[in-house]
Image (cartoon, helix red, strand yellow):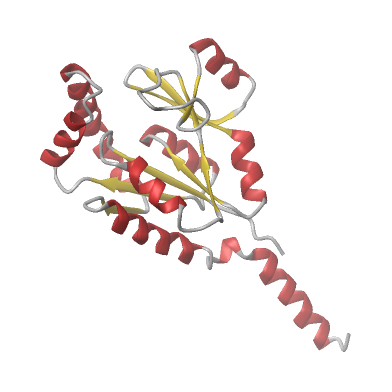
């Protein structure tokens, strides 16, 4: 019997290392499926269409909104990001836990549609370390770094809306803790209703001498 998969939302400030942690997490189970987001921002060096993101122009993105092909979307630093619906729902039906790397605006929309979704916010060890990580990328101007820090101030107001936080001091250890938590969620009552109902029916049949 295939159990319905669940949604795991992973958010965090730009530069906190979400991608590195998620890469390590995905290697820990073949029951994880990473949902590639769509975005209107330009690809960074070494990023590929369909791997890190689906890189779209604004017209293409608006067409996905019009056709209800996104379960959530949000504007972040003058660019749009969204989660394609088809892949997420197919993977959940197959029993996969779908990992979504999205912003706080999108996370709130996910929570409204999927109340059982697991919301995780990844934190830096300190504000100073976050700034150092952003600067260490070497791919963004001082103005963009300042914009991302300003955005982090706003995002910090939503942290209490998440189920758990993890400090990304070491990406490997952070991924291991997240993996343990997600695996524990597989025992939630709401994730196991088909099993529960099947056993209930079997016990009831025994009481009737069937």
Q: Residue at x 46, y 27 (%)?
A: 48
Q: Residue at x 29, y 51 (%)?
A: 171
**Residue 18 figure quarter:** top left
Left or right of 66 on screen, residue 185: left
Residue extending farthest right: 210
Left or right of 200 on screen, residue 178: left
The location of residue 5, given as percent across then percent down, is 59, 54
Residue extending farthest left: 128
**Residue 63 figure quarter:** top right
Left or right of 25 on screen, residue 149: left
* Figure label count: 0
Where, quadrant-wise, is the N terminus in this rendering? bottom right
Left or right of 141 on screen, residue 182: right
The residue closer to the viewer here, 47 or 126, is 47
The location of residue 173, given as percent across then percent down, is 29, 59
Residue 81 vertical placement versus 171 (above, below): above
The location of residue 2, given as percent across then percent down, is 69, 60
Q: Residue at x 26, y 35 (%)?
A: 15
Residue 27 vertical placement versus 101 (above, below): below
Residue extending farthest top: 59
Where, quadrant-wise, is the C terminus in this rendering? bottom right
Q: Residue at x 28, y 33 (%)?
A: 14
The location of residue 84, given as percent across then percent down, is 57, 31
């Amino acid at each position: 019997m295939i159990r319905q998969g669940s949604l795991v939302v992973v958010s965090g400030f730009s530069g906190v290392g979400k991608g590195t942690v998620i890469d390590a997490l995905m290697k820990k189970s073949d029951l994880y499926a990473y949902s590639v987001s769509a975005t209107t921002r330009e690809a960074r060096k070494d990023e590929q269409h369909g791997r890190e993101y689906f890189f779209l122009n604004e017209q293409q993105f608006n067409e996905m909104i019009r056709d209800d092909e996104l379960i959530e979307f949000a504007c972040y630093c003058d660019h749009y990001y969204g989660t394609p619906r088809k892949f997420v729902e197919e993977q959940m039906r197959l029993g996969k836990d779908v990992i979504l790397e999205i912003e706080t605006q999108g996370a709130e929309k996910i929570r409204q549609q999927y109340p059982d979704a697991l919301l995780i916010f990844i934190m830096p060890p300190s504000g100073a370390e976050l700034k150092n990580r952003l600067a260490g990328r070497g791919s963004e101007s001082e103005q963009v770094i300042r914009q991302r820090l300003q955005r982090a101030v706003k995002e910090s107001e939503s942290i209490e809306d998440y189920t758990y936080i993890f400090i990304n001091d070491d990406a490997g250890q952070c991924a291991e803790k997240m993996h343990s938590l997600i695996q524990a969620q597989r025992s939630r009552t709401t994730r196991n209703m088909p099993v529960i109902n099947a056993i209930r029916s079997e016990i009831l049949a025994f009481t009737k001498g069937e």
